[in-house]
Image: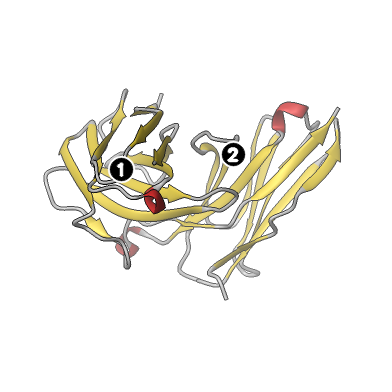
Amino acid sequence: QKEVEQDPGPLSVPEGAIVSLNCTYSNSAFQYFMWYRQYSRKGPELLMYTYSSGNKEDGRFTAQVDKSSKYISLFIRDSQPSDSATYLCAMRGGWAAGNKLTFGGGTRVLVKP
Amino acid sequence: GAVVSQHPSWVICKSGTSVKIECRSLDFQATTMFWYRQFPKQSLMLMATSNEGSKATYEQGVEKDKFLINHASLTLSTLTVTSAHPEDSSFYICSARTGTGYEQYFGPGTRLTVT
């Protein structure tokens, strides 16, 4: 079993719909959770960064972390064709755990006009 | 802020030659830089972690003599692929982390093709 599981998709939605993405993980030591967006043949771009359980909102993006269920989510409201990309979740432990990020496999999202 | 650049963005080389890829943090000092490899439609695979002024730490299965990493300053790390072979063809991405932050900021990637 992988440490971080993420549905590869593709997830196809009409423009304006809400995109719902999620990851599950098995390592209870993970404390910091990130979502990255990666366009084809480009480096990942940091979208959201959260610590511990709870919600965080930034514009059209909302990140949720439920540490008790080992489950994180990213919601994209009012999706646009420009949101079509691969979304990667990533997480890491505390300072003592070192610098290494553990990534999910990525979910490919297609927003159709 | 938090911009990371890579050079070159694309390189083609002949089998047996060496290729150097540069990773720079443009507007912050990166105490730690990371090198990843990514195959098509797959996630990122961490190759090594480098801290400024010290030797890189390689992940299991990554040949340190083949993938030479140098982190000479707080804004520059280089990855040299030595004696490249076609199987080394891949997308190489670096990331950088500040001394106090937990986030990693990624460069745009370098596509290496070995013929």
The residue nearer to you, when weighing B92 against A83, is B92
Farthest-out residue, bottom: A1
Q: Quadrant of the C terminus of chain A?
A: top right
Instruction: Answer above or below: position of B28 versus A10.
Output: above
Q: Is residue A32 visible?
A: no
Which image quadrant for residue A68? bottom right
Q: Is residue A13 left or right of residue B50?
A: right
- Residue A88 in the image, given as x and y percentages of width and height: 58, 48
Q: CA distance from mark 2 to mark 1?
A: 23 Å
The residue nearer to you, when weighing B13 against B8, is B13
Instruction: Answer above or below: position of B66 versus A83.
Output: below
Q: Quadrant of the N terminus of chain A?
A: bottom right
Are circles 2 and 1 on residues that touch, CB within 8 Å? no
Look at 11% across and 44% down and name the residue there.
Answer: B53
Q: Amino acid at mark 2?
A: Arg
The chain under label 1 reads B
- Residue B41 in the image, given as x and y percentages of width and height: 60, 49
Determine which residue is flagged by label 1: B100
The chain under label 2 reads A
Count of picture labels:
2
* Labelled disc at residue A60: none
Determine which residue is flagged by label 2: A37
Instruction: Please rate how many residues cluster around mark 2, counting C-alpha atoms within 10 Å: few if below 14, some from 14 to 19, many from 20.
Output: many
Q: Is residue A81 left or right of residue B39?
A: right
- Residue A95 in the image, given as x and y percentages of width and height: 32, 58
Q: Amino acid at mark 1?
A: Thr
Farthest-out residue, left: B53
Look at 52% across and 33% down and name the residue there.
Answer: A42
